[in-house]
Amino acid sequence: MFVIQIVGYKNSGKTSLAVELIKCLQQKNCKVATIKHHGHGGEPDIVTNTDTDKHWIAGAAHTAVIGEKTTEIRMKNESVSVEKILKLYNDGGISITVIEGFKYKDYPKIVLIRNREDCRLLDELTNIKMVYSQDPSISHASKPLYHNKEILIQAIQQQLSEFRSVT
């Protein structure tokens, strides 16, 4: 399984890039999964007042609801890690996982730069494969730099082997 990590500061375009990349990979018949860091504080949006929510409130460590075409699982964080989710995805036949956030994890990453201040990420982060910025004044980076999102997505697809295979 290949892992593509998309990182950057808030409002740098991580979700937009992830969505466009997922659509492109899906069109090429890749089985794509995602992991998203909820970096805004608090808890992710969860449907409340359901039977599984009542199970959760009662103290269940994990809950799952299985529908006709979708399964939703909720787990306490002490039971979960990015690595465990990647193993679950790999066991489930996923070919590519897009991770949005978790910038200090050591997966192959694309760093999104909004402005010159954000360039410090290029010194702080590990395993950078590509850099993307809409700011044309950002002109130097130690890794391939893209200013056009479509060209970046093409490059990711062409250089997929650069993104670590996880088993």
Image (tube, rainbow, N blue to C red):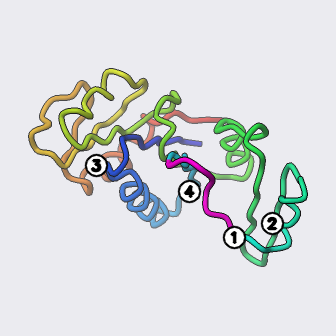
Q: Residues within 10 Å of mark 4 (few under 14, many from 20)?
A: many
Q: Position of residue 157 (x, y in %)?
A: 38, 49
Which amino acid is tagged 1? Val
Q: CA distance from mark 1 to mark 3?
A: 35 Å
Label disc, if present, on residue 152 of the rendered structure: 3
What is the secondary structure assignment of the residue under circle 3? helix
User: Pointer 4 and pointer 2: residues touching (CB < 8 Å)?
Assistant: no
What is the secondary structure assignment of the residue under circle 1? loop
Q: CA distance from mark 3 to mark 2?
A: 40 Å
Whether residue 117 is visible: yes
Specify whether 118 is left or right of 87.
left
Q: Residues within 10 Å of mark 3 (few under 14, many from 20)?
A: many
Residue at horizontal 90 percent and vertical 58 percent from the top: 58
Which amino acid is tagged 3? Leu
Residue 45 magenta-drawn? Answer: yes
User: Pointer 1 and pointer 3: residues touching (CB < 8 Å)?
Assistant: no
Q: Which residue is mark 1?
A: 47
What is the secondary structure assignment of the residue under circle 4? strand
Q: Position of residue 162 (x, y in %)?
A: 42, 34
Q: CA distance from mark 1 to mark 2?
A: 7 Å
Q: Which residue is mark 4?
A: 32
Q: Reading the chain from its start, which is encountered first: label 1 or label 2? A: 1
Q: Which residue is mark 2?
A: 53
Q: Looking at the rendering, which quadrant does residue 126 occupy?
A: top left
The residue lying toward the viewer, choosing from 63 and 45, is 45
Front label number (1 vs 4):
1
The residue lying toward the viewer, choosing from 49 and 162, is 49
Front label number (3 vs 2):
2
The residue lying toward the viewer, choosing from 151 and 72, is 72
Residue at horizontal 28 percent and vertical 37 percent from the top: 131
| Residues rendered magenta in the picture | 40-46
